[in-house]
Amino acid sequence: MSSQHRTSSKGLKGKALVLATAASALLLTGCSEQAKVGWLPTRRGVTDNANTIMELWIGAWIAALAVGLVTWGLMIWCLIAYRRRKYETGYPRQVSYHLPLEIFYTAIPIILIVSFFTFSDKAEREITAPKSDVADVTIEVYGKQWSWDFNYIDENVYFAGVQARLDKEGQIGVEETLPTLYLPVDSTVDIQLKSHDVVHSFWVPAFLEKRDTIPGMTNHMYFTTGSEPGTYQGKCAELCGEYHSEMLFNVKVVSQKDYDAYIQSLRDSGQEGRLGDEQNRNPNMNTNQ
């Protein structure tokens, strides 16, 4: 066997090993917990809306991958079946149109677009459907430069947030200083979003939702919390001024007993009542609607 042949053989084996390793990694990644949630920053059961969004996201990727595989397969087939042979000269026979193919290439995209729209619209309607009349917990959230106020409407208590302070590494010294919104497990929640000054955005990545807080308006987020306690990070997702990056908060989903204990602690601290529109700082604002 010549040295050139041996080198070629080793090269082929090396390429085969690389391809096998890549395929194995892909298969193993597909079985991971991260892949099961579509590489989203959450897990199943955090809220009912998160589950709906996750299913829509994963379904869309599966559909897109299926379309891609079919398209790539057709392209490869055309490259092989209609390639120029050694004995052929000149241009191949030209076809001005092919009616069945034209219908196929028109109908399939229309079906895909209508399908994507239908599923997206259904998910959006489920997520945004008003639930104020069936809410177990109603919380009024005010965004402000650069923190958050939480009014627990049903319990008539409030929490006034203070701006987080980050060090040079972007870390928070004491986590407990962050404004923390408490929610009980297995509860339908109506979060009423308002602003004391400028436009902010209430974003909890694990919930897969965010809503703007707009001066003079009230936005809503409706969802049902999961059955397991958990702590989730939140932040403002709308550039709102110099310390926008420090407008952080936490959401704690706790047992009903712990939730009641927290509400009582606010009451014992004298934080009864509501922080309302009297705290507004925007001179162009009247009263919230």
Image (cartoon, rainbow, N blue to C red):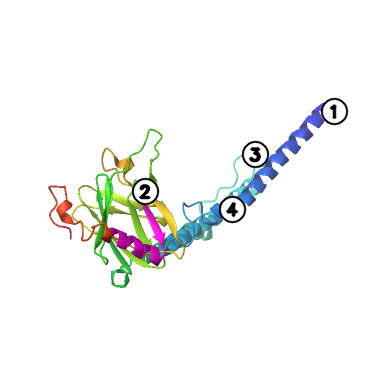
Check disc 4: other Cα within 10 Å, few if <14, some if 14-19, many if 20+: few
Task: Evaluate if marks 1 and 4 touch, with contact meaning CB atoms under 8 Å apart.
Answer: no
Residue 2 image label: 1
Check disc 3: other Cα within 10 Å, few if <14, some if 14-19, many if 20+: few
- Residue 133: x and y in percent read 28, 72
Residue 89 image label: 3
Q: CA distance from mark 3 to mark 4?
A: 53 Å
Q: CA distance from mark 2 to mark 4?
A: 33 Å
Can residue 87 be seen by looking at this rendering? Answer: no
Q: CA distance from mark 1 to mark 4?
A: 45 Å
In the picture of the structure, the residue carrying the numbered disc 4 is: 32
Comparing labels 2 and 4, the label whose residue is closer to the camera: 2
Q: Amino acid at mark 3?
A: Thr
**Direction from residue 2 to residue 160 in the image, left or right:** left
Q: CA distance from mark 3 to mark 1?
A: 38 Å
Q: Amino acid at mark 4?
A: Ser
* On screen, residue 52 above or below 97: below
Name the magenta segment's main secondary structure. helix
In the picture of the structure, the residue carrying the numbered disc 2 is: 176
Tell me which residue sits at (25%, 58%) in the image.
158
Was residue 253 drawn as part of the magenta stretch in this picture? yes
Q: Nearer the viewer, residue 22 or 274?
A: 274
Comparing labels 2 and 1, the label whose residue is closer to the camera: 2
Residue 216 image label: none
Sequence-first tag of 2 and 3: 3
- Magenta stretch: give its range: 250-267
In the image as oriented, which residue stretches furthest toward the front? 268
